[in-house]
Amino acid sequence: MQAYQRMTVKNIINFANPRTFVASIIPAIFGILLSLKLGYSLSLARALALIMACVFFQAAVNTINDYSDFVNGVDSLDDNLEEDDNVMFYSNIRPKSVENLAIIFLLIGIGLGFLGLDRMNFPSLVIAFIGLLTVFLYSKGPLPISYLPIGELVSGFVMGGLIPLGVFSAVSNSFDGKILLASLPFMLGIALIMMSNNASDIEKDRRAKRYTLAVVMGRQKVKVLYKISILLWLLSQLSLTYYLAGLPILALNSVFLILRLRLIRNVFAASLLPEVRIGQMISIVKANVLINGVYLTGILISLFGA
């Protein structure tokens, strides 16, 4: 039997998967900006602590996903994986060490979350508990969320909705359901990242008896849902930009989107086939940076009275 390799700094970074952090950083920053827009204040140190708490929670999820896929024998050489995307598959690292790394990421995230709190409050604790529960149930347990056709819904809601709501609650010590409505573009954008990944993995997931939404619907039907979701994403972003930031910001927002229309067209035309999985994932992440980043920038500009 081959001896286990020692975990390196590069392995730790790859398990955390920083390329996906946009899905937690942008919603966290949005929660901070929306709190400021609604008249609340916080220090730069608290803001950074809240952002980094979300990042470490995501690093924990990414690590647990890699661990679970490996121990369940989900991945193979035919699945169009990059070495950096699945360290356990390409490197012989002790599974227990990977599980411990996920726990360390999680504990750091919890600690940073407490540092970001102004004071203990019930809404923040409830939202944090739901986030923790999702981290553990997404890939582990008797019936993991990632094996069910609700992965897009859960990941979009938790990362795109609960992150801004949790940040707002930490800043304001209160709960405001309107934050979830304002977070709709983030929920849709993150759900689309998951949908792109799962639609590309239909054949692999069928072998693993993983009944994702894409497996249940089939590639052709999920492609239709994918396109409809992109249109809803753009419509919600433009509508909420107008509502929260006004007409001048909406006009500026529209110009940015038109300038990058080619990227949006490429995402809309995605085949969702496994052989082009990596390129499609890069494109949908770039689209999240563009569409949700422009939305974020509009809110930031509106803070200065533009």
Image (spheres, rainbow, N blue to C red):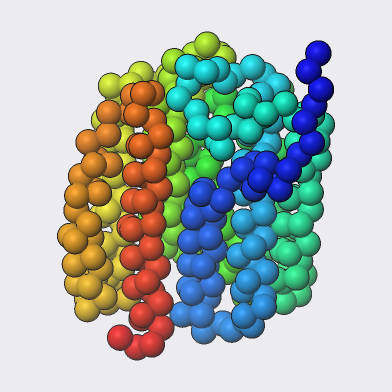
Q: Residue furthest top?
A: 207
Residue at the image point whose x is 77% and y is 43% from the top:
101
Which x, y percent locates residue 17? 58, 45
293 lies above or below 264:
below
In this view of the protein, which residue sits in the foreground, 95 or 229?
A: 95
Which x, y percent locates residue 197? 44, 33
Q: Is residue 193 left or right of residue 52?
A: left
Identify the image quadrant of the C terminus.
Answer: bottom left
Q: Is residue 64 left or right of residue 211?
A: right
In this view of the protein, which residue sits in the foreground, 153 or 7?
A: 7
Residue 199: tell me if it is visible: no
Which x, y percent locates residue 241? 31, 68
Residue at the image point whose x is 79% and y is 36% from the top:
6
179 lies above or below 77:
below
Q: Residue furthest bottom?
A: 305
Q: Quadrant of residue 128?
A: bottom right
134 lies above or below 125:
above
Residue at the image point whose x is 34% and y is 29% from the top:
276
